[in-house]
DNA sequence: CTGCATCGTGAGATAATATATCATCGGCCG
DNA sequence: CGGCCGATGATATATTATCTCACGATGCAG
């Protein structure tokens, strides 16, 4: 339920000393109710319905906050944002859980997964290069099960 | 050597029935001679020095071609382009070799690696979700060896 | 030769995404 | 009160990318 997710997000922010203001909460709600990754300007358009004065910085500031809190993720290949499937995992500050995206070429469906095999392989590869991983963007493009069987 | 790389690129294109025209070759040269990932408009500025009429589509069309040919890659997090470290790998198959990027937060250095452990882990994770991988974007952000020891 | 398709490019406009800057407001604390 | 700080409002601008129409060259078919 979206309401539940919003309440959990609020609680998580409080635990970290951050504030999920009404504006931020509304933007998070808009991201969550979209059934696909959603662009900043699409969010802005919807936001304007209830906040006529909203401008790009309005939505980008909210998105920045939500990203920092690990409540949403950005899909770099799409320049779009999605709600984190398990925001509960992202407890600490700067402690974003490892995640990967599966993006279907045909239907556009985007799924977040948390595969530790991938995370470990990345960690190992980086270590071999003397590189300390802070975060990793993994966006896998291909064909989803439904589209493949069609 | 850059000249060598350009000649190899030309040969590779010919083998695939593609044409590395003077314009495309020049853009590839500009990407290769940059010591860091370079944005499309930075390329455009340099291109204008020898081609005053160059416009955004000029450079984007060249970049699209070079991406298709696997001669360059795009860094999605930076909206920037780099020459492929081993364009030779993309030879026989007509598809792009798996690759990952290590991006240092401190100094901005970007290194392309080809780690099969990561590629296999991604393949396995996708398979578990019934997803057929076509390509994967992997951009790892953190601290490089030099910066860590400083 | 002529017509026609294809490819690469030129040129101008526009779209889509993101940031910079300054002002304002309200809570909080000393 | 008076100063600080986080959040928002408001305007302008920067950055990245695509659309559209046109033109010349090339190769091939009729
Ligand atoms: Zn997540
Ligand atoms: Zn699909
Ligand atoms: Zn490469
Ligand atoms: Zn570094």
Image (tube, coloured by chain):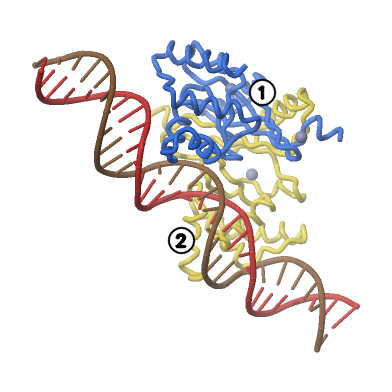
Chain colours: A yellow, B blue, C red, D brown
Q: Which is nearer the eye, B71 or A58?
A: B71
Tell me where residue B82 appears, x and y as whole percent: 59, 29
Q: Which residue is pictured at 48% across the width and 66% down the height?
A: A48
Q: Residue A45 carries which label?
A: 2
Disc nearest the viewer among 1 and 2: 1
Instruction: Chain letter for mark 1, please.
Output: B
- Which residue is denoted by mark 1 in the rendering? B113
Q: Quadrant of residue D2?
A: bottom right
Query: For this view, does B41 lie left or right of residue A86?
Result: left
How far is the residue under mark 1 from the one under mark 2? 40 Å
Q: Which residue is pictured at 86% across the width and 32% down the height?
A: B149
Q: Residue A134 carries which label?
A: none
Q: Which is nearer the eye, A78 or C7?
A: C7
Picture layout, residue A6 above or below residue A76: below
Tell me where residue C30 appears, x and y as whole percent: 90, 78
Q: Which residue is pictured at 76% across the width and 40% down the height?
A: B106
Q: What element carries label 1?
A: strand
Picture layout, residue A8 above or below residue B112: below
State the count of labels: 2
Tell me where residue C22 appears, x and y as whole percent: 64, 70
Picture layout, residue B16 above or below residue D4: above
Q: Split into 4 quadrants, where in the image is the N terminus of chain A?
A: bottom right
Instruction: Chain letter for mark 2, please.
Output: A
């Amino acid at each position: 339920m979206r309401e539940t997710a919003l309440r959990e997000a609020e609680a998580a922010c409080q635990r970290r000393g951050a504030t999920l203001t009404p504006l931020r909460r509304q933007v998070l709600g808009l991201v969550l109710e979209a059934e696909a990754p959603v662009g900043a300007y699409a969010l802005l358009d919807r936001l304007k319905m209830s906040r006529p004065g909203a401008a790009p910085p309005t939505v980008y500031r909210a998105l920045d906050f939500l990203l920092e809190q690990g409540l949403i993720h950005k899909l770099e290949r799409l320049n779009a944002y999605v709600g984190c499937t398990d925001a509960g995992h992202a407890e600490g500050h700067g402690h974003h859980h490892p995640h990967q995206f599966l993006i279907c070429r045909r239907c556009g469906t985007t799924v977040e997964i948390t595969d530790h095999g991938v995370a470990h392989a990345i960690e190992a590869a980086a270590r071999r290069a003397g590189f300390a991983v802070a975060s990793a963007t993994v966006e896998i493009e291909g064909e989803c099960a439904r589209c493949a069987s069609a």
